[in-house]
């Protein structure tokens, strides 16, 4: 129990519950843990014990290069804030015809790509609203132009929600939409639109988005077509992220994680909603009240859980 986690520490140090200790041992030894075990760890494991178990799993997985940590320089380019989807947590979007709406033209987008390259950046996150006129053709044009001017840039962009929207606008299926934007230059999906897949939470925060089931299905299609993804935005309507609440199994159980991991999602990237930007009450029912008591440890816990549970 609690075998070496580096620098003389054991990963179960501080863990008093033998069951938790066993789960951490299993994760650190490289065994996949179950959804229920992951939830128990998330709720009850001491932060540093989980971190040490995650580090042990990482060292095991990347034996030989475990002392190397890498990073990339990425630029997020927002191409428009005009959106028809009106998510209740969103402070970014403006409804069509709103005076605050804008669209960035291609020259501006390419200028931002050039700045990214000059600063040593290697990746672009192309992200924006669901503009009512932007079908597959818009993204094909933008991605092809970026790749032609800067073939060295990785386009890690969009996600199931944008695909669902662009396919609808263009009147094509999602598989065709994905294949076309991939052919135009998309390298991987950023997993946008994954802000809580369980129906209750999704209906509360993003009632006009595709359902959680559709989101999963689109991502699986993308993975089948060779487009990998990362995923997860959390912190909207749960005190401590999506895993604590009344639908944790939807995230780490049959409906979520295994489907994504098995089909090709390679990064579980917990992205915490920034509550500093108040949601705007565009939705007829008014803005939802975000939970301002969420635990900032959640992002660290989820990162650790990623390393410990999803290897
Ligand atoms: S989060 Fe929702 S409302 Fe905001 S830009 Fe994305 S789809 Fe539109």
Image (cartoon, rainbow, N blue to C red):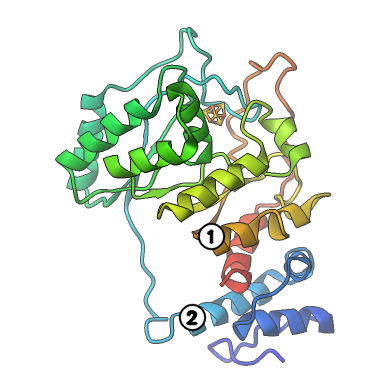
Q: Quadrant of residue 218?
A: top right
Residue at x-position 65% and y-position 88%: 10
Measuring from the top left, give residue 83's x and y in whole percent. Answer: 51, 21
Marked residue nearer the N-terminal end (1 or 2): 2
Which quadrant holds the N terminus? Answer: bottom right
- Give me the disc on residue 186: none
- Give me the disc on residue 263: 1
**Left or right, 132 with reference to 35:** left
State whether residue 70 is above or below residue 215: below
Residue at x-position 61% and y-position 58%: 259
Residue at x-position 32% and y-position 22%: 104
Image label count: 2
State whether residue 188 is above or below residue 284: below
Which quadrant holds the C terminus? Answer: bottom right
Residue 143 visible somewhere in the drawing:
yes
Residue 185 visible somewhere in the drawing:
no
State whether residue 222 is above or below residue 23: above
Q: Distance from label 1 to label 2 (Cα)? A: 20 Å
Residue at x-position 62% and y-position 27%: 87
State whether residue 157 is above or below residue 83: below
**Left or right, 112 with reference to 222:** left
Q: Nearer the viewer, mark 1 or mark 2?
A: 1
Residue that carries the numbered disc 2 in the rendered image: 61
Ligand 1 falls in quadrant? top right
Q: Quadrant of residue 138?
A: top left
- Residue at disc 2, secondary structure: helix
**Left or right, 133 with reference to 241:** left
Measuring from the top left, give residue 262's x and y in whole percent. Answer: 56, 64
Q: Nearer the viewer, residue 14 or 101?
A: 101
- Residue at disc 1, secondary structure: helix
Measuring from the top left, give residue 204's x and y in whole percent. Answer: 74, 31
């Amino acid at each position: 129990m609690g075998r070496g986690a580096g620098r003389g520490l054991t990963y179960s140090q501080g863990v008093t519950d033998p069951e938790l200790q066993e789960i951490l041992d299993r994760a650190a030894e490289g065994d996949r843990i179950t959804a229920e075990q992951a939830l128990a760890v998330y709720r009850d494991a001491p932060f540093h014990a989980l971190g040490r178990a995650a580090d042990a799993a990482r060292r095991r997985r990347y034996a030989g290069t475990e002392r190397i940590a890498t990073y990339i320089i990425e630029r997020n380019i927002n191409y428009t804030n005009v959106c028809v989807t009106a998510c209740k947590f969103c402070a970014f979007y403006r409804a069509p015809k709103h005076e605050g709406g804008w669209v960035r033209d291609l020259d501006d987008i390419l200028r931002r790509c050039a700045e990214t390259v000059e600063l040593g950046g290697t990746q672009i996150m192309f992200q924006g609203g669901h503009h009512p006129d932007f079908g597959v053709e818009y993204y094909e044009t933008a991605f092809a132009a970026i790749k032609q001017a800067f073939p060295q840039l990785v386009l890690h962009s969009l996600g199931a929600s944008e695909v669902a929207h662009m396919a609808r606008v263009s009147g094509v299926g999602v598989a065709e939409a994905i294949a076309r934007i991939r052919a135009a230059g998309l390298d991987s999906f950023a997993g946008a639109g994954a802000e809580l897949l369980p129906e209750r939470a999704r209906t509360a925060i993003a009632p006009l988005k595709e359902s959680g089931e559709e989101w999963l299905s689109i991502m699986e299609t993308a993975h089948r077509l060779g487009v990998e993804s990362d995923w997860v935005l959390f912190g909207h309507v749960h005190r401590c992220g999506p895993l604590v609440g009344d639908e944790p199994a939807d995230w780490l159980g049959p409906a979520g994680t295994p489907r994504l991991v098995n089909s090709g999602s390679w990064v579980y990237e917990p992205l915490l909603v920034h509550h500093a930007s108040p949601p705007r009450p565009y939705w007829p029912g008014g803005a939802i009240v975000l939970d301002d008591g969420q635990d900032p440890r959640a992002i660290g816990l989820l990162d650790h859980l990623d390393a410990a549970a999803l290897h």
